[in-house]
Amino acid sequence: MSDEKKTVREEKLLRLKEDLNINPYPARCLESMSIDEIRDAGETEDNIVASGRLTGKREHGKTVFADLRDGTGSIQLYLGRKVLSDRDWSVLNLLDLGDIVQVKGSVFTTRTGELTVKCEGMELLSKSLKQLPVVKVDAEGVAHDEVTDRDFLYRHRCVDLQVNRDSLDRFVKRSRIISALRSYLDSIGFLEVETPVLQPLYGGAAAEPFETMYGSMNQQFYLRIATELYLKRLIAGGIDRVYELGKDFRNEGIDRTHSPEFTQLELYEAYADYSVMMNRFEDMFCAAAEVAGHGDSFVYQGENIDITPPFRRTGFLDSLRKASGEDLFSWEIEDLRRLIDKNGIITQADDRITMLDKLFDHYVARRIQQPTFVIDYPEELSPLAKRKEGASGVTERFEVFIAGLELANAFSEQNNPVLQRKILKEQADASMHRKGELDEDFLYALETGIPPTGGMGIGVDRLVMILTDTGKIRDTILFPHLRRNDQ
């Protein structure tokens, strides 16, 4: 907004306060009907009260037509000099687009068929000092003067939600999707819990943590990278079905599908395995799709996605061999490195496990379009999963892929305390941050005894991406991480 426009608005603010003795920011107002409710009720001679933001203003001498919008919709206002008091007419002349007002009056239909509030009174609830962009939609539904600066809209989500209906709808759907996930789990006896965000030891995934110092304890802490180890302690405590839906943090890069702060749903179920988790995912995904407005299929980035259960299943090793034409798990590190460089895969990894995982992403994962469970991962890639009986070197683990995106990761959980201690010791010895340190509290819980358990983590932001046809993860996060303006 230019300094000139800001000055005009500030002058109007001053006139409202000094000339009209109006408080432009009152503490309270009358209870209102939503615009949706007004539209549903239709014409009435009784006075109704509506509140919202002015998004249009058309002056015709002693008559003004305006548009009022709240979170449910928009309605036309009719403001006539003969109807309004001198005070209200003076206030009207000092209003700008973006101001928040409350009106009361009857509801009628104009000769052009437009439902309209005939205003008999008006109160200013909040004077806007920043001009919102004006996006116009023509008769064919084509928008003009749209704001295309995504960085500006991410930084000022208040503007984005006001001027981009698609953005508002996306976040409404996100809320409904999360509610559907909770509702499903609650309905079958899962208990939602909260575990620590600040952890003295981090675990449950292979990722770089954010570090902080707890001053009063003089102790290093980490923002959690996963909730897994705490939730498994609760399985040991006798909560047989448990879940947490919350934020995890990983000190890694930002791209189209990754955010350093993201929302994850983790659930654990005693006396279950990874096949049960497949059923749980199908049920939850279909429930989330329904509240997002989808049936048995929907379009994501131009591709029709069929979500009719059961979803396709394919083995990790078989799919990689078929896609690459090679048995890559028999290759030496140097050969894997050359193949990665040949295919232009960007990674600094120099360990065999990470390189194999990157090659799987390149050859298999990014090419999967329809909902698919990739099952039975090699033991090297799944140190926390149970070994599959009768299959050497393979674990009971799956990941879910849709349109090239990984949405979930699940195991038949490792409950052998001796083997788990050995695996965690190897991980800790290789870690930069906690050389040799083990989560003895988790291992203590494991040693008390944990039944056969199925566990799963679902990336909620990516789930929302898929179900709202969104190409970037930051478009599903209300306040994504951005560089400071001075950077």
Image (cartoon, rainbow, N blue to C red):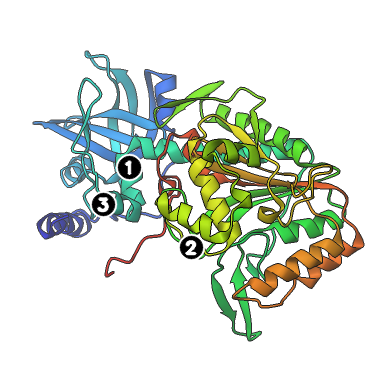
**Residue at image mark 3:** 128
Quadrant the N terminus occupies: bottom left
Q: Position of residue 304 (x, y in %)?
A: 46, 24
Q: Amino acid at mark 2?
A: Glu
Residue 154's spot in the image, x, y percent? 34, 52
Do tag 3 and tag 1 residues touch (Cβ < 8 Å)?
A: no
Name which quarter of the figure residue 289 lies in: top right
| Foreground label between 1 and 2 | 2
Q: Is residue 439 left or right of residue 172?
A: right
Q: On screen, 294 above or below 175?
A: above
Q: Residues within 10 Å of mark 2 (few under 14, many from 20)?
A: some
Q: Secondary structure at mark 3?
A: loop
Q: Measure the C-alpha gap from mark 3 to mark 1.
A: 13 Å
Give me the residue at 56% from left, 68% from top.
209
Task: Identify the residue at horizontal 50%, vertical 65% (top origin).
Answer: 251
Mark 1 residue element: helix
In the displayed structure, 65 sits above or below 27; it is: above
**Mark whose residue sits in front, 2 or 3:** 2
Residue 3 locus on image (x, y percent)? 12, 60
Say which residue label 2 marks: 252
Numbered circle sitting on residue 11: none
Residue depth check, mark 3 versus mark 1: number of the one nearer the observer:
1
Residue type, label 1: Gln
In terms of image quadrants, where is residue 319? top right
Asked whether, in this view, residue 416 is left or right of residue 173, the answer is: right
Residue 261 seen in this snapshot: no
Per the model, the C-alpha gap separating discs 1 and 2 is 32 Å
Q: Residue at x 37, y 35 (%)?
A: 166
Q: Which residue is mark 1?
A: 162
Q: Residues within 10 Å of mark 1 (few under 14, many from 20)?
A: many
* 445 is higher (above) or lower (below) than 72: below
